[in-house]
Image (cartoon, helix red, strand yellow):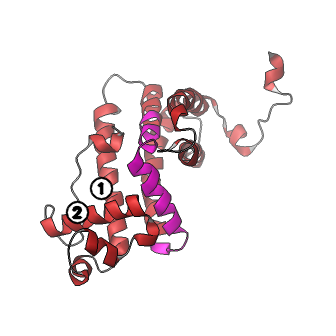
Amino acid sequence: MTPADRAITTPRPGGYARGAATAEAIVKAAHKVLIEEGAAQFTVRRIAAECGMKVGNVSYHFPRKEMLVQLMLDDMLESYDKVLDNEVRQPGLTAQERLRRVIALCLEDIAGMRTTRLFTELWAMANHNAVVAERVAQFYARVHGVICEYVSALNPALSAAETQTVALYISASMEGATPFLGYRKPWADRMPAFIAIAGKALVELACTITPDDIAGLGMPTRDPCDAR
């Protein structure tokens, strides 16, 4: 079970109270279509067929399919926030351990079908849809904010901009694993080792990187491996 699966989410359709059965059914169907059939099939007509409704009914609740994307991302953020409360924001944990847990949770999530397929399709949609691109960017900005919190605690010598750059690097390093180690990807079986390596390397990076390193001024004069 991935971190996203550990939290119960309830869709929140635009303009409709939480718990509205019709809107919830539409969001659930849209989620299923995008994950199982891909962006090419993510149409109002296909979503309507999936939830057994007329196209007009779906369009009434959601005039634009981008609204469905926004809701899916909002619900994922809410579910992740619950997981962070349960597994990361616990008393007695060091900043190193909090960041390590965030890294592990993100990579465990990438290993699940939902996240591997959903974000692959959203990235594809974002290439051709400015609204989706903006929504995805907003989602990742929230994720980077969580990582920034712990990088800042570990390395107060970094400026806000430098902390954001390190957080972006950590996030990109994890997301870059998707086509290689995600659900049913060629090296999916290596994910546990990848999580262990990433937890060690990325936390150490957050603790030790300097402003000069980020500016490209702290490059070693010789290969550090030669010291061995």
- For the record, the magenta segment spans 104-131
Picture coordinates of residue 105 (x, y %)?
A: 41, 37
Which residue corresponds to the image point at 27% horizontal and 76% vertical from the top-left? 62
Which residue corresponds to the image point at 27% horizontal and 73% vertical from the top-left? 49
Q: Nearer the viewer, residue 11 or 159?
A: 11
The quarter of the picture where the C terminus appears is top right
Pointers 1 and 2 in contact (C-beta within 8 Å): yes
The residue beneath circle 2 is 12
Dot 1: what SS? helix
Q: Residues within 10 Å of mark 1 (few under 14, many from 20)?
A: some
The quarter of the picture where the N terminus appears is top left
Query: Can residue 173 be found in the magenta stretch?
Result: no
Which kind of residue does numbered mark 2 sit on?
Answer: Arg
Picture coordinates of residue 189 (x, y %)?
A: 52, 33
Query: Can residue 130 be found in the magenta stretch?
Result: yes
Which kind of residue does numbered mark 1 sit on?
Answer: Asp
Q: Name which of mark 1 and mark 2 comes first in the sequence.
A: 2
The answer to whether 10 appears left or right of 69 in the picture is left
The residue beneath circle 1 is 75
Which residue corresponds to the image point at 46% horizontal and 56% vertical from the top-left? 119
Dot 2: what SS? loop
The answer to whether 55 appears left or right of 150 in the picture is left
Q: Nearer the viewer, residue 78 or 9?
A: 9
Tell me if residue 47 comes above or below residue 192 in the rendering. Answer: below
Would you say the magenta stretch is mainly helix, strand or loop? helix
Question: Could you tell me if residue 137 is visible in this image?
Answer: no
Q: Residue furthest top?
A: 228
Picture coordinates of residue 58 (x, y %)?
A: 24, 77
